[in-house]
Amino acid sequence: MPGKPVTHAARLDETHDAELATSVSADAKIAVLKQRVSHAPLWIVAYGISMGKSIQTGTRVRIVQHRRMRRGRVYAFIATSGTLTVHRLRGVSAGRAWLRGDGNAHDDRPVSTESIIGRVDRIEGVSTAAFVARDVIGRVRLDVDSVRRRLRRWRRTRRR
């Protein structure tokens, strides 16, 4: 059934068998998706709010094979719940990866680095500028809202 949601963060493009992706184990999903990404980029349609303004619902996201994981870049992975998710890498240690959606306050549960399908290298949609800015800047969050919050806090501390 094309268009059937696979996860809270992404859905397979209409050219792929979404029904199959929902009925297989997490390990099988990882193997199939990694093999697919190793041959050609994989486009998915993102939905949900976990990536905030960086990747909005309806944005098409291209996943490519990654050679080396780098903190601050966006990756697609199979979460512990078995869902295909797109979030930003916060760190890697001892074969585990910590990721977080830009719109989330806390990190996701750590996942095995083997669960990482690939790196998001291109998006098409309404949020392209925000994604590029965050990817170029990497570790620094240059978000207008966070700058405003910091300015408000600074002003409050000066008044006291």
Image (cartoon, rainbow, N blue to C red):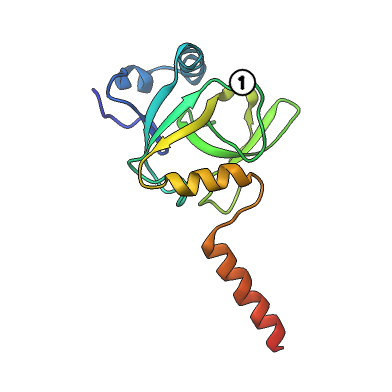
Q: Nearer the viewer, residue 23 or 66?
A: 66
110 on left or right of 46: right
Q: Residue at x 39, y 45 (%)?
A: 48
Q: Nearer the viewer, residue 33 or 121?
A: 121
Give percent across and percent down for residue 154.
67, 76
Q: Residue furthest left?
A: 1
21 on left or right of 97: left
The quadrant where residue 16 appears = top left
Q: Quadrant of the N terminus?
A: top left
Task: Note whether residue 78 is visible.
Answer: no
Q: Residue furthest bottom?
A: 160
Disc 1 packing (10 Å; few <14; some 14–19; many ≥20): some
Q: Is residue 105 above or below residue 48?
A: below
Q: Is residue 2 above or below residue 70?
A: above
Q: Residue at x 62, y 73 (%)?
A: 151
Q: Residue at x 56, y 47 (%)?
A: 134
Q: Quadrant of the C terminus?
A: bottom right
Q: Nearer the viewer, residue 132 or 54?
A: 132
Give percent across and percent down for residue 74.
55, 36
Question: Please, what secondary structure does the residue beneath circle 1 have?
Answer: helix
25 on left or right of 108: left
Task: Note whether residue 140 is visible.
Answer: yes
The amino acid on which the numbered mark 1 sits, given as a three-letter code, is Glu
Give percent across and percent down for residue 15.
28, 19
Q: Which residue was labeled with disc 1? A: 114
